[in-house]
Amino acid sequence: MAMRTKKNELSVCYPNAAGIDVGGGSHFVAVPPDRSDLSVREFGCFTEDLYAMASWLAECGVTDVALESTGVYWIPVFEVLESCGLRVLLVNARSVKNVSGRKSDVLDCQWLQQLMSFGLLSAAFRPPADVCALRAISRQRDTLLQEQGRCIQRMQKALTQMNVQLANVITDITGQTGLAIIRAIVAGERDPAVLAKHRNYRIRASEETIAKSLQGTWKEEHLFCLGQSLALFDTYRTMVAEVDAQLKTMIAPLRLHAAAPLQGKPKRRGKNAPDFDVREALQQWAGVDLTRIGGIDVGTALKVLVELGPDLSRFKTAKHFASWLGLCPGTRISGGKRLSGASKRIPNRVARALKLAAQGLSRSQCGLGAYYRRMAARMGAGKAITATAHKLARLVYAMLTQGTEYVEQSQAQYEERFVDRTFKYLQQKAKAMGYILVAEAAV
């Protein structure tokens, strides 16, 4: 007798859904065909047009809107529609690929509307508005630091072209000694012995060595480039200080948790760290001190919180969070055979910051440092960085969701736990083969 099979038919989950194809000059909007005589309309990109779009969607009875994350063009559309009371889903462009055939803006918005109505789209993560504002300022700070770094490279290039080998005797030409010497050169000083007098007592190289490195050709074209690069460097440093002041002002209203005594030895501030007490400000904002985790300094903690915010409830588990960051092993399996275990290449700023933090654990004597070295010995430095960043992401998720402080584990404690786990595993293997494994100390 033939058995009847139940067909898995798609059901409409969001009957009041609309789809928007976002563009640079205009936006195409599709609503359900029964809501309007013209189910697809084109709207301009001006603010007046966006509010007209929101009014038309309200007239059509639309409550849910899906739009693609196209560059930065989607941001005004998202903010205007959300302010008008619509539920807006920002979806990844890779998950809404059009069906094969002729591609057009009209087909794209209709395809988005169909996928949204059947509940086949999931919203991308977007933090609250106050965190988005902080994120914009923080990213501006990163841009200024990158431009400042290019100015340093141009200053070093100008010095090298004049055969002024200052970079070979001091570690950082933008430190106290290096900047003092460069400013004196731009001001007109050419005597190496006089320039070497700017040496700080912490510099290992002697004044004689520094004086030897400052015997250059002093060509006018290179001196001109050096002076302009120095002026740009000072300009960017002033702008970074203004951004730091803006960050401090914007974080102040978010410090809702009571001030608690910060435990543990404060970590060394990075050279590019903001010029205020970031650790205390972030602890009062998030309720926990992320810098207690090995490898995470104030810069990394600031990057995590301004990109995500302290509320990670949008991610169901730590596995979902690590997968969103692109730090999970890949699961490419075909025919029962694992093809690849490489993690996804996702351009995520938080993941990049965690990887840099993991890389800094290579010589740390904490438990996380021991974990990194064990992973590096087993599968190489690249995969060890990703694995350690994955562990850091899980620790960050646990602290922000549970509100518990991190208790640092020493290298000796980590090694002891690793030996215990290995011994228990070997005991189980020996028992399965009919043997009994006994520790030598217990005999």
Image (cartoon, helix red, strand yellow):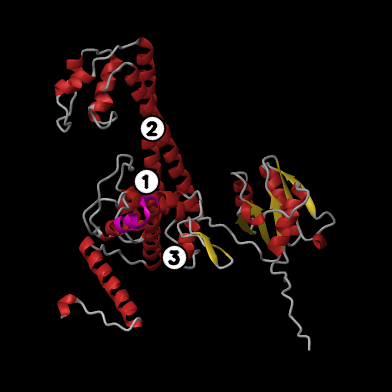
Does residue 406 appear left or right of residue 27 in this picture? left
Q: Which residue is mark 1?
A: 248
| Residue 256 appears in the picture as rendered | no
Image position, residue 87 (x, y; %): 63, 60
Q: Earlier in the sequence, mark 1 or mark 2?
A: 2
Q: Look at the numbered disc 3 and give the secondary structure of its residue.
A: helix
At label 2, the amino acid type is Gly
Image position, residue 174 (x, y; %): 29, 30
Q: Nearer the viewer, residue 395 or 13?
A: 395
Residue 318: assigned label? 3
Could you tell me which residue is drawn at 29 percent across and 55 percent down? Answer: 373
Q: Earlier in the sequence, mark 1 or mark 3?
A: 1
> What is the quadrant of the C terminus in the image?
bottom left
Quarter of the figure with residue 255: bottom left
Residue 346, above or below 227? below
Q: Which residue is mark 2?
A: 149
Could you tell me which residue is drawn at 44 percent across and 65 percent down? Answer: 318
Quarter of the figure with residue 199: top left
Q: Residue furthest bottom?
A: 1
Image position, residue 354 (x, y; %): 39, 52
Q: Main secondary structure of the magenta part?
A: helix
At label 3, the amino acid type is Ala
**Residue count near mark 1 (Cα–Cα under 10 Å), binned few <14, some 14–19, many ≥20:** some
Image position, residue 112 (x, y; %): 70, 56
Residue 11, above or below 248? below
